[in-house]
Image (cartoon, rainbow, N blue to C red):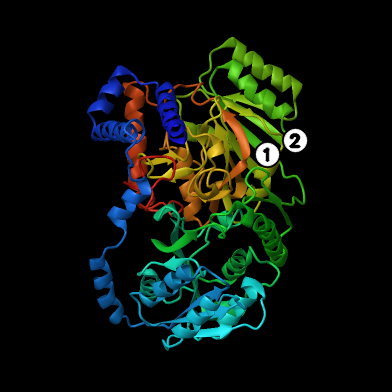
């Protein structure tokens, strides 16, 4: 049944794309005979064929991740090559692997230990702390492995839980770098190699993390890969996206408290938050280097084991804000308990100037204005509508009626020249005086009162650039949940056509995330930062001007942010239709694409907030083909 539902969702998504494509016969013909068009057509038939094999003939077909593993995970020849490479490292630090133990399944424990002993990089020590296990089998095994001089074991005389056990393992560690391992998980053979290899050219790195997956013990398969983004501070404040493996300089650990007793279930999150506060150079390695085992007793496989952990995570995140002197409260998501939404306290209500470009369509513009004024709890905002080549009487009547109703908060002006979104909003910027600027399409419908307040809380932060929202199509499927550079071309929206209920991998859809860009359909920015990057680029006439704007902010060192709790309906492209619906607009499309590709090629090739192991062809964060 789940497979049928998944296939139906894909069919619905294809229908949605066709409904919104507004394809002319000319563009459809060009697309059909293009290389991209041919690839997409063949991919569709390949997926359909897999569905027939799986559902109709009941044949087991490998998952996307299993196919990815077969293609991209290292082979024995790679391990042999890396073994030679590591022998020639000029920087060969001792790495202490920290392993707290308490009554694990003996086979799982053996596999964990063997995964360390089989490392390509050979300058390591294994520091084991047994937390007063009652299993004679476990105790005998731990005594036996001490025959290897690289393995040190301390036997605790009382059970103190994972934090105390980990601290005791750290006490006997002498390595310059530390890596943490749970007693039922295991490392890939190349795990330590990749971390130490990075140190050869970047010895100043003091905190590293990598990708991971889960090993399903019952089915004996690897699944649920977590391909993570590069360092994303605001993502970390929504949930512990770093998880395993973590590779840390010992001197950095010595600067902070070690594992905090009493926060079991969130001790890793707590340590990561404190370490990243102090770290000078944080690096992400985009390789799967850690296998997290799923079984009945693990938090990976047992939902009841997670309940206490969620509360502890909320506590450690609140502690982090308190420790940093940030006036914020941690709001736990009611649907997704492992997701948190920090609410930054506003000392005042800065004025927001809402800039809305529009052309005719009085009905949809009225829906936008009505829900904006009547459905927004934040009060200190004004609105400027930029009429571009409008010619319908009812549209002007609507604008005049709002100016009469809200004389101090609403205004409109005519900007009658060939459509240029960037020029429009830049001209609008000159006419408003809000401390914060909110770009809003006239086909946006407000559905939650606190949406603007949530955006203001983030946009006022000095380190934040553009703040964006979750946008729905009218049928409640996702239209926008962040922008991925290089997705399906120059850039694409994450999770288009997918229901919010799916949550995304590791809560990606329903949690706050740093992205390289957010859509200009609903984008808030501080006035000073708008000026600093020179506003919108007017040579980027119709398309990708919002993405270009966000990347300019990124280049200045600001972080762009998607807020999952800011939810709006986007009646997309109602005012102007598809942006390249005829030969003239298609020519402008090619020009916009050409400029963007030339200027932002490095982000198209490698979006720092999107893992290179993920697909560029689909919107749902599946592994690349």
Question: Does the CB distance between marks 1 and 2 fall below 8 Å?
Answer: yes
Residue 515 image label: none
- Return the x and y of residue 337 as percentages of the image width and height: 65, 49
- Return the x and y of residue 381 as percentages of the image width and height: 71, 36
Mark 1 and mark 2: span between their CA atoms? 8 Å
Above or below, 402 against 184 in this view is above
**Mark 1 neighbour density, 10 Å: few (under 14) some (14–19) many (20 or more):** many
Q: Secondary structure at mark 1?
A: helix
- Return the x and y of residue 452 as percentages of the image width and height: 68, 39
Above or below, 392 against 153 in this view is above
Residue 526 seen in render: yes
Q: Secondary structure at mark 2?
A: loop
Which residue appears at 65% of the width and 30% of the height?
446
Instruction: Determine whether, in the image, residue 194 is placed left or right of residue 357.
Output: left
Residue 377 image label: 2
Instruction: Determine whether, in the image, residue 178 is placed left or right of residue 302.
Output: left
Residue that numbered label 1 is attached to:
452
Choose the circle earlier in sequence order: 1 or 2.
2
- Return the x and y of residue 338 as percentages of the image width and height: 62, 52
């Amino acid at each position: 049944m789940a497979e049928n539902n998944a296939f139906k969702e894909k069919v619905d998504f294809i229908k949605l794309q066709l409904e919104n494509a507004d394809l002319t016969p000319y563009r459809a013909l060009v697309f059909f005979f293009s290389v991209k068009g041919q690839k997409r057509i063949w991919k569709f038939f390949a997926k359909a064929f897999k569905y027939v094999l799986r559902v109709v003939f009941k044949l087991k077909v490998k998952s996307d991740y299993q196919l990815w593993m077969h293609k991209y995970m290292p082979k024995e020849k790679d391990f042999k090559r890396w073994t030679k490479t590591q022998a020639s490292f000029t920087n060969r630090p001792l790495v202490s692997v920290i392993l707290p133990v308490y009554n694990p399944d003996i086979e799982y424990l053996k596999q964990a230990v063997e995964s360390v002993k089989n490392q390509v990089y050979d300058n390591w020590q294994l520091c084991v702390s047994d937390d007063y296990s009652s299993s004679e089998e476990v105790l005998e095994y731990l005594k036996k492995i001490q025959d290897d001089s690289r393995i040190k074991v301390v036997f605790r005389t009382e059970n103190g839980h994972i934090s105390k056990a980990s601290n005791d393992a750290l006490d006997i560690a002498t390595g310059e770098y530390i890596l943490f391992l749970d007693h039922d998980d295991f490392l890939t053979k190349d795990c330590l190699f990749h971390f130490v290899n990075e140190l050869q050219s970047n010895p100043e790195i003091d905190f590293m993390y990598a990708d991971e997956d889960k090993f399903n013990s019952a089915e004996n398969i690897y699944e649920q890969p977590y391909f993570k983004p590069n360092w994303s501070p605001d993502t970390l404040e929504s949930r512990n996206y770093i998880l395993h493996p973590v590779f840390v300089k010992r001197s950095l650990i010595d600067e902070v408290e070690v594992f905090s007793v009493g926060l079991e279930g969130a001790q890793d999150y707590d340590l990561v938050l404190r370490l990243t506060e102090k770290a000078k150079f944080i690096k992400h390695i985009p390789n799967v280097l850690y296998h997290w085992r799923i079984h009945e007793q693990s938090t990976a496989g047992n939902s009841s084991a997670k309940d206490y952990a969620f509360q502890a995570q909320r506590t450690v995140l609140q502690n982090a804000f308190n420790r940093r002197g940030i006036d914020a409260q941690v709001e736990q998501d009611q649907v997704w308990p492992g997701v948190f939404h920090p609410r930054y306290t506003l000392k005042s209500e800065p004025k927001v100037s809402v800039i809305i470009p529009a052309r005719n369509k009085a009905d949809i513009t009225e829906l936008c204005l009505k829900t904006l004024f009547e459905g927004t709890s934040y009060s200190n905002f004004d609105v400027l509508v930029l009429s571009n080549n409008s010619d319908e009487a009812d549209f002007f009547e609507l604008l005049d009626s709002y100016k009469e109703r809200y004389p101090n908060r609403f205004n409109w002006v005519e900007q009658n020249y060939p459509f240029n979104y960037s020029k429009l909003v830049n001209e609008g910027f000159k006419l408003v005086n809000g401390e914060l600027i909110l770009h809003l399409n006239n086909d946006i419908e407000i559905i939650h009162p606190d949406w603007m307040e949530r955006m203001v809380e983030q946009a006022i932060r000095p380190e934040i650039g553009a703040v964006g929202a979750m946008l729905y199509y009218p049928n409640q499927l996702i239209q926008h949940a962040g922008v991925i550079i290089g997705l399906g071309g120059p850039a694409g929206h994450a999770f288009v056509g997918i229901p919010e209920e799916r949550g995304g991998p590791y809560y990606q859809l329903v949690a706050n995330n740093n992205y390289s860009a957010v859509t200009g359909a609903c984008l808030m920015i501080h006035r000073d930062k708008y000026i600093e990057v020179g506003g919108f680029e007017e040579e980027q006439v119709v398309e990708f001007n919002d993405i270009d704007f966000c990347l300019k902010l990124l280049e200045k060192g600001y972080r762009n942010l998607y807020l999952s709790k800011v939810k709006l309906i986007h009646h997309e492209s109602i005012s102007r239709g598809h942006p390249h619906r005829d030969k003239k607009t298609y020519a402008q499309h090619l020009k916009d694409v050409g400029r963007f590709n030339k200027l932002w090629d490095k982000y198209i090739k490698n979006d720092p907030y999107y893992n290179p192991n993920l697909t560029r062809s689909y919107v749902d964060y599946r592994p690349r083909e």
